């Protein structure tokens, strides 16, 4: 039920391409990128009520504290941003390979649900309890681990970041949370906070 790792092959392939922007790189990883994107576009479901593509249910976010609720979880913030970004990168791969854009991928990119905002900050998931303050604060990684996307507004993420810093159960976190939060702070233009969370 955990889906946050699904875009990873596209992320890694893009890093390889940025390191070696050659046709050989595209050819070597094209199948991985394009097949991953096909799965991701198929996984996103059209919701007639919201007229948006949604992730889940069932789904478990990277913040696995929600696992027992997986049958009703929808639209985790980090995963929404990662889905939109990875599909956009996959379309760039098609263009680099001189292929036409895949129409269904564009539909999901344009139509994926925005993350839920409550009281001026991002919720972690799109249904109650909206945010539990334990385990990975992965909602922050929607801007940091994931490069900027149209889904994530920096001002809202800044408020979310400071809210997490003030209210999270830090004893429940994991080692990789701190560099991921530092990446978010850096993208928000807060280098001192990036160092603080690393320390």
Image (cartoon, helix red, strand yellow):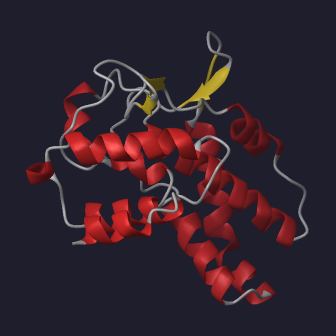
Image point (62%, 39%), residue name:
42
Residue 1 visible to an observer of this rendering:
no
Identify which residue, 107 or 170, lies in the foreground.
170
Q: Position of residue 116 (x, y in %)?
A: 49, 26
Q: Quadrant of residue 113?
A: top right
Image point (63%, 73%), residue name:
14
Q: Quadrant of residue 177?
A: bottom left
**Whether residue 101 is situated above or below residue 33 in the rendered picture:** above
Seen from this angle, which residue lies furthest front?
192
**Whether residue 125 is situated above or below residue 61 in the rendered picture:** above
Residue 91 visible to an observer of this rendering:
yes
**Whether residue 105 is situated above or below residue 16 in the rendered picture:** above
Q: Quadrant of the N terminus?
A: top left
Q: Position of residue 71 (x, y in %)?
A: 32, 23
Task: Locate residue 62 relative to residue 169 in the image: left or right.
Answer: right
Q: Position of residue 21 (x, y in %)?
A: 74, 86
Task: Locate residue 185 relative to residue 93 in the image: left or right.
Answer: left
Identify which residue, 79 or 123, lies in the foreground.
123
Q: Quadrant of the C terminus?
A: bottom left
Q: Position of residue 10 (x, y in %)?
A: 59, 65
């Amino acid at each position: 039920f955990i889906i946050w790792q699904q875009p990873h092959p596209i992320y890694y392939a893009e890093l390889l391409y940025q390191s070696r922007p050659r046709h050989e790189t595209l050819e070597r990883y094209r199948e991985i990128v394009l097949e991953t994107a096909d799965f991701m576009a198929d996984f996103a479901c059209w919701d007639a009520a919201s007229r948006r593509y949604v992730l889940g249910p069932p789904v478990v976010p990277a913040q696995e504290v929600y696992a027992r609720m997986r049958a009703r979880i929808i639209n985790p913030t980090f995963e929404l941003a990662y889905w939109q970004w990875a599909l956009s990168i996959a379309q760039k791969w098609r263009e680099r390979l001189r292929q036409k854009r895949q129409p269904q991928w564009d539909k999901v990119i344009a139509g994926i649900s925005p993350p839920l905002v409550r009281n001026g900050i991002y919720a972690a998931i799109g249904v109650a309890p909206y945010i539990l303050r334990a385990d990975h604060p992965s909602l922050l990684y929607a801007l940091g681990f994931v490069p900027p996307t149209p889904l994530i507004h920096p001002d809202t993420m800044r408020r979310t970041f400071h809210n997490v810093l003030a209210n999270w159960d830090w004893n429940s976190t994991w080692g990789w949370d701190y560099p991921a939060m530092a990446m978010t702070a850096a993208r928000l233009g807060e280098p001192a906070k990036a160092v603080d969370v690393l320390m």
